Image: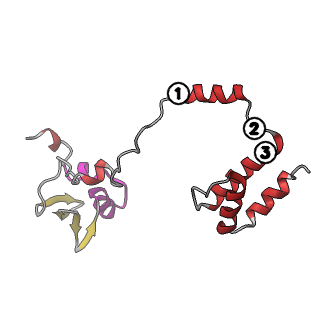
């Protein structure tokens, strides 16, 4: 009596891992190499189909063996890599145009003298912290300005 492969596969999907392991033992005559449910379902389904429909021909098996011999297969597992990228490992570099932390940048703008303190991580203006000089310049002017240009630091990268 021929097997109804689709109904057999549906039954496999409803089985527990222990039941699949037992079914694997029946079909293959050996214990299951894994306890991964989807793997067992697929492996048993393939074997049932091969038994019902016929296995690979000897010619197909030889060709598959040739392909495996010619393939560039990895012989070792890849080395464990750190989850951090090289950029994440390297310390953040300061922009060469910026003076050292603690320096106070002074700018006269519309009759006011403005003072911005350079911090190790950002800038302080009127007791508020900002991540960028551009954010400070925008707070002062209400418009988008390049912070380096606004504070006259644009040519500093060429200085020693």
Residue holding disc 1: 69
**Foreground of the two, 49 or 103:** 49
User: Is 124 placed above or below 38 here?
Assistant: below
Q: Is residue 67 above or below residue 141?
A: above
Q: Where in the figure is residue 50, as x and y percent of width and height? A: 76, 43
For this rendering, which residue is in front, 39 or 151? 39
Q: Main secondary structure of the magenta part?
A: helix
Residue 149 lies in the magenta-colored region: yes
Name the residue at 85% across, 57% down. Answer: 7
Judge from the rendering whether residue 41 lies leftward or rightward of residue 135; answer left or right.
Answer: right
Instruction: Compare residues 159 and 9 and report the one nearer the observer.
Output: 9
Mark 1 and mark 2 residues within 8 Å of each other at the beta carbon: no
Compute the Cα span from label 1 to label 3.
27 Å
Nearer-N-terminus badge (1/3): 3
* Quadrant position of residue 128: bottom left
Query: Under tag 1, what secondary structure?
Result: helix
Quarter of the figure that contains the C terminus: top left
N-term mark: 1 or 2: 2
Query: Residue shown at 11%/57% (left/top)?
Result: 100
User: Is label 3 in a helix, a strand or a loop?
Assistant: helix
Residue sitting nearer the eye, 30 or 130:
30
Q: Which residue is located at x 63 percent, y 29 percent?
A: 64
Mark 2 crowdedness (10 Å alpha carbons): few <14, some 14-19, many ≥20:
few
Q: Position of residue 70 (x, y in %)?
A: 52, 25
Give the distance between the C-alpha atoms of the residues marked 1 and 2, in whole angstroms.
21 Å
Residue numbers of the magenta segment = 132-152
Residue 57 location, quadrant = top right
Reading the image, the residue beneath label 3 is 51
Q: Is the residue marked by circle 1 packed among few (<14), some (14-19), or many (20+) residues within 10 Å?
A: few
Q: Which residue is mark 2?
A: 55
CB within 8 Å, label 2 to label 3:
yes
Which residue of the protein is positioned furthest toward the right in this rendering? 1
């Amino acid at each position: 009596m021929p097997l109804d492969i689709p109904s057999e596969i549906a039954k496999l999907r409803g089985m527990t891992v222990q039941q699949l392991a037992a079914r694997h033992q029946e079909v293959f005559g050996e214990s299951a190499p894994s306890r991964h449910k989807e793997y067992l379902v697929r492996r048993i389904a393939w074997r049932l189909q091969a038994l019902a429909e016929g296995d690979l021909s000897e010619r197909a098996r030889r060709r598959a063996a040739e392909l495996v011999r010619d393939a560039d297969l990895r012989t070792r597992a890849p080395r464990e890599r750190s989850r951090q990228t090289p950029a994440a490992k390297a310390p953040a570099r300061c922009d060469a145009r910026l003076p050292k932390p603690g320096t106070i940048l002074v700018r006269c703008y519309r009759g006011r003298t403005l003072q911005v303190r350079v911090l190790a991580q950002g800038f302080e203006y009127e007791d508020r912290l900002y991540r960028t000089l551009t954010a400070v310049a925008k707070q002062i002017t209400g418009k988008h300005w390049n912070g380096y240009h606004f504070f006259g630091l644009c040519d500093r990268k060429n200085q020693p």
